Amino acid sequence: MVFSVKDVCLKMDGKQILSDINVDFHKHKFNAIIGPNGCGKSSLIKLFAKINKQSSGKILYLNQELEKVKRKDFAKNVSFFFQFNDNTADITVLQMVSYGRSAHKKLYQSLDANDLAIIEDAIIKCDLVEFKNRELTSLSGGERQRVYLAMTLAQEPEIIVLDEPTNHLDIKYQFQLLSLIRNIMDQKNLTIICILHDFNQVLKYADYTVVLKDGKVYDSGITSEVITVKSVKEVFDIDSIIHSDGNGFHIDFIV
Amino acid sequence: MDQKNYKFTLKITIAIGLLFLLSLISISYGESRIGLVPSLQALFGIGEKSAITIVQNIRLPRVTAAILAGSTLGLSGLYTRVALKNPLADSSILGIQSGASVMALISLLVFPAMASFLPLFAFIGGLLAFIIVIGFSYQNGFSPMRLVLSGVAVNSFFTAVTSVITINHINEIKNSVQWTSGSLVGISNSQSQAMLIYSVIAIGIAALLIPMLELLKLEDNMLISLGKNPNLYRFIASVTAVMLASISLAFVGVIAFAGIIVPHVSQMLVGSKMKHVFPMTVVGGGILVVGVDLFSRIVFVNEIPVGALIGVLGAPLFLYLLRGAKHGV
């Protein structure tokens, strides 16, 4: 397990956001988190980043208490891909991707040949070679997401935690980005924890899935066992049909 | 890349040249006019004795103080702007300068013998005011408007306290009236030298923080993902900004809006990369204060404090930026 969440509750401004969360995230797997809006998905992964702090319960990161793990050591293994909407001017793609290396560097340490090779590799993997010297502000939403992903890869994490990376992307780029993430995961034997809101994407890419409802874990486990007609009806209040063919499962909604 | 660096080098060279030229004109201009060349010679102790005395003991200290005030205030504005992600964040708006004046005045009254430590007292006062403003405006982040409004309130409070102290102790602290409107009159050689030492140290410290400031421009969540602590960076940058503003305040008094004008124009000229905008702000701050001081001496018969004139220039820019700021208190 990369993260084990034990009896975690989270209150913010007097509001109960998460209650009695008990869930594990599996190593070297694609772990999806899905649930209706406001169910506490982002709040949960912000606990991993220590942006939020649980009111009770504990989180284990590789069997040690997360609170005791140093911020710097943590960043060498775990990278977060939040919903960035960076408008910083005068930053080129190359620079932005290079920032990924700063997780491994002291403030005044400059990049060496090894770093440059890693950055170059991340740029190639995310298909950004032609954009390398372009300014970030001149790119489209989908291109920018790829830059953030390249930055994340340059950080060389073993675990990547993503908060709806497909948000605001055209459908073609949604699948492109997720396929890219999945390929890199398989190649480099990474662990992915990813909030998604599309069932077909979850069925296509995720090995394990956590379903959240009203700040609680509705169910968790192997994706095809968790995403069922029954669970979709109970959590999202919509009827559906789930088909299975040689390529896996996909879902149709009955409206 | 090379093209950009070339452009920057060109611009900074022109700026340095302009600053040098303005400073030289400023040194040569006054009740007794000394030509540009004799002024330059007098700086090195060559030429008429009277000219050397005037240049070295009266005019050079004034120009030095003007350059340093502009550089420190400009940098202070640049650092608060980046740290608080708010182009309206200036040491005057945030109450730093008025808080610093109160402490500086108190220190003059209570410990008159420790006048050379004035910037340190000012620093404490500025920090106090800044902490109060931040304390009142923080609520899940800083809204630009809430920050400015808290600053205005705290600024008014400390300005009022300054007036009370000044009026009650007018004989003990003769220079305090000039102080409240930022004046370069009567800066002595020893004062300008002390200011130079303080400024070089503070600007040096600020320069060491350039990589930190560059990272601070990124989103907080991104920094956290990279294992950095954005609030710690923000704290360090802010304390540095208060330190820079306190130096200017301790020697020449309140100059509002310089911390908005200088970084804003510098960024327009050379872009927002810290390694470019930092030197441009240092030089640009000097140009602004030396230029305004020279202008005021040429145009007005009665000397107008430089702080007042910069306020006249800065207020419209402030209002313009306010219109563009994100709304919501």
Image (spheres, rainbow, N blue to C red):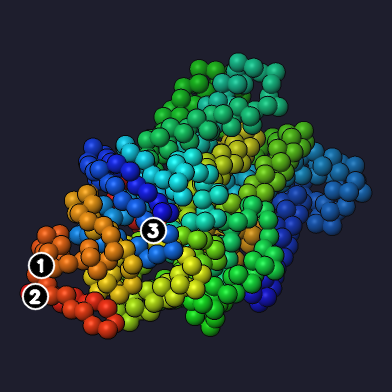
Q: Which residue is mark 3?
A: A26
**Amino acid at dot 1:** Ile
Residue plotted at (45% across, 70% down): A185
Residue plotted at (61% across, 24% down): B174
Q: Which residue is mark 1?
A: A238
Q: Which quadrant, please, contains the N terminus of chain B? A: bottom right
In the rendered image of this protein, does residue B122 appear above or below residue A210?
above
Residue B169 seen from this side: yes
Earlier sequence position, callout 2 versus callout 3 = 3
Dot 1: chain letter: A
**Amino acid at dot 3:** His
Residue toward you, A50 or B167: A50
Residue A59 lies, in percent from the top left, at 38, 44
Residue toward you, A34 or B68: A34
Looking at the image, residue A17 sits to the left or right of residue B51; the answer is left
Question: Are discs 3 and 1 located on one and the same chain?
Answer: yes
Looking at the image, residue A76 sits to the left or right of residue B36; the answer is left
Dot 2: chain letter: A
Residue plotted at (57% across, 52% down): B213
- SS label for mark 1: loop
**Amino acid at dot 2:** Ile
Marks 1 and 2, how far apart in space?
A: 7 Å
In the rendered image of this protein, does residue A43 appear above or below residue A15?
below
Give yes or no for contact between labels 1 and 2 (Cβ–Cβ under 8 Å).
Answer: yes
Give yes or no for contact between labels 3 and 1 (Cβ–Cβ under 8 Å).
Answer: no
Q: Which residue is mark 2?
A: A254
